[in-house]
Amino acid sequence: MEAVIAIAIGIVFAAGIWLVLRPRSFQVLAGLMLMSYAVNLFIFAMGRLWVDKAPLTPAGTPPDPAALADPLPQALVLTAIVIGFATTALYLVVMIGARGLTGTDHVDGREPEP
Amino acid sequence: MTALDQLILMPVLLPLLCGAVLAPLTQGWHRLKFALAYASVLGMLATALVLVAMTDGGYWQDGIGVYLAANWAAPFGIALVADRLAALMLLLTALLALAALHFAMQRWGRIGVHFHTLFQFLLMGINGAFLTHDLFNLFVFFEVMLASSYGLLLHGYNAERLRAGMQYIAVNLAASLLFLLGTALIYAATGTLNMADLAARIATLPAFDLGLVQIGAGVLALAFLIKSAMWPLGFWLPTTYAAASPPVAAMLVLMTKVGTYAILRLWLLWFPAGWGHDALLWGGAATILFGAAGMLSTDSAGRMAGYGATVSSGTLLAVIGYGQPSLVTAGLYYLVGSTLAIAAFLLLVELIDRIRTPGAAILAVTMEAYAVEDKPDEPLGQGVPAALAFLALSFAGCALMIAGLPPLSGFVAKFGMFHALLNPAGGNIPGAAWALMALVLGSGLVAAMAMLRFGVRTFWATKAAPPRLHRSEVAPVLFLLALSGVMTIEAGPIFGYLGRASDGIHRPADYIGRVLGHPAVPSASSVAEGP
């Protein structure tokens, strides 16, 4: 299970890095999004992989750490998703602005000379 | 906990509330917006001064004030910690913000709708990053700071700013992902995110988990070093500085120091044995070389200031990596002095550019894009007499400080560093000390040459008509230069304070004891039930 998750995160992250290094701004954006998905999965997995364990204590019962999943990475990943979403949306707006002002979607703001 | 302890929260709370109030106000109220923002910055300045007095005056044991957010005892909640170093950085932030805001009064604050709101949120992020003692909370404050800086960098929208902004945002989004990776790995290995708790646990970790923490810390360091523009991670910096509007560029100078601050604090706290210091020392040395070469290669003043900031970052990183408490003292003095100097230079750049390109064509795009009806006053009428003399003299002042020549504070900082390097605790002066001194001297010489060349070309080799300057644009530059003068005259007491600050951060056990031992305020019900 751990190996499958690790390989999956690695593939998504690698695909993201490849896209970030491409010259078109939309590819860069897609790459950043893939990388942020991989990072979110990574944070989630850092609380260890559990099956059938809740992160919350039912009311009225004494908490038993062995029966519970670690709730903190789940809280962290929520924050990371929200922040990542907002900043990526901002990048999208800047991208559209740059396309309108420079007339090209190249990351340098001008087409490379052939 | 007394009312004075609550002051620790003020530098975060004040700009947050002020920014929230400013957001819905339209540009028709621009005078009110400016007044509120100004009041908020003055409040921050007063708070920072009180915090400096409190940390240094023995109000708190060991000079460390702890604030438990929502009254959760550390390490379960988020702790804010004010010590001498944090108080110093808060003071520096407030002083720079005051100058930048004053500079923006006449023009820059009025051409976009949300300049003042974003400026306040930027201050909130910076202040929070200085105060927080929780790793994930540090990430959140970094993001607050970065998100506002994205908006501010685009302020005064034109094609050049957009291009620079795209690269700046992409680089920083990637850096934020690295920050998250490092944080998650450190949490996985230790099970905590409180910095003091981490320091206590890292000391007793088994070898395998320690390796994981070091990988996590290395990834985290990459994120900080991208911010502080260590070679080869700092290629974004000169373009960004040259493209940003002057008040924003002045604040960006401070943001590179936030990364350096995080490295300084965390590495001394977590790895007192010196893990990773060599990488910082030689990385910093390479950064000095890169920045010095850059200063020589460019003839645009904005880029020159950017490379100057790179040299300053490199010097600081090398000082941290060298790992000697007395050198850190001089390094902190250098940090404050060089930040003030480069910020003053960046403010000055726009005024100097008016000699070359009179008029304000840059504003046209923005005025159209935001449909701003109330056209900002051109700096006419209330002009400053002897504008050219003012520009040349201020430029000379900045050049002296950046190059580290006497009599201003840059020289005192370099003298302090050399004094520390030549008087090590053990008696032997290692080769690295000579290399570092040669680099610092060489970069100073290069900076002097580059600035001299620019000065001669601008002030002597052209038949310049004196440009129109407004009083509100002249005052901040003079203010920053005067601060540098004060730093030179009061170097003795300032070095005393910085020595105590450096001494404090070199004793991690104090932080572990004070933060983890800080009692939560007893709740009202338990007080009532008490004996």
Image (cartoon, coloured by chain):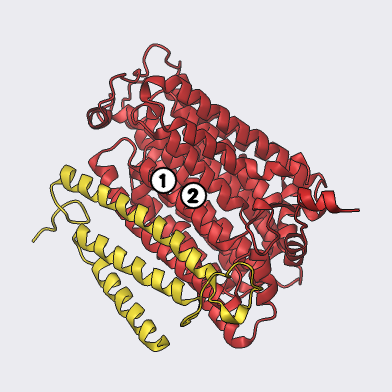
Who is closer to the viewer here, A97 or B422?
A97
Image coords of residue B82 (percent x, y): 69, 50
Image: B10 above or below B24: below
Point 43% across, 67% down: residue: B178
**For chain B, what colour was chosen?**
red
Direction top: furthest residue: B381
Tell me if residue B27 can be seen: yes
Point 54% across, 74% down: residue: A70
Who is closer to the viewer here, B105 or B405?
B105
Image coords of residue B184 (percent x, y): 50, 71
Circles 2 and 1 on the same chain: yes
Mark 2 highlights which residue?
Answer: B255
Amino acid type indicated by mark 2: Met
Image: B164 above or below B136: above
Q: Are marks 2 and 1 in contact (CB under 8 Å)?
A: yes
- Between label 2 and label 1, give the one nearer the viewer: 1
Disc 2 to disc 1, C-alpha distance: 9 Å
Callout 1 environment at 10 Å: few (<14), some (14 to 19), or many (20+)? many
Snapshot quadrant of residue B213: bottom right
Image coords of residue B409 (percent x, y): 62, 42
- Give the side of residue B378 with respect to residue B486, left or right: left
Mark closer to the chain start, 2 or 1: 1
Mark 1 highlights which residue?
Answer: B149
Amino acid type indicated by mark 1: Ser
Who is closer to the viewer here, B512 or A57?
A57
- On-image quarter of the N terminus of chain A: bottom left
Direction right: furthest residue: B531
- Give the side of residue B326 with respect to residue B343, left or right: right
**For chain A, what colour was chosen?**
yellow
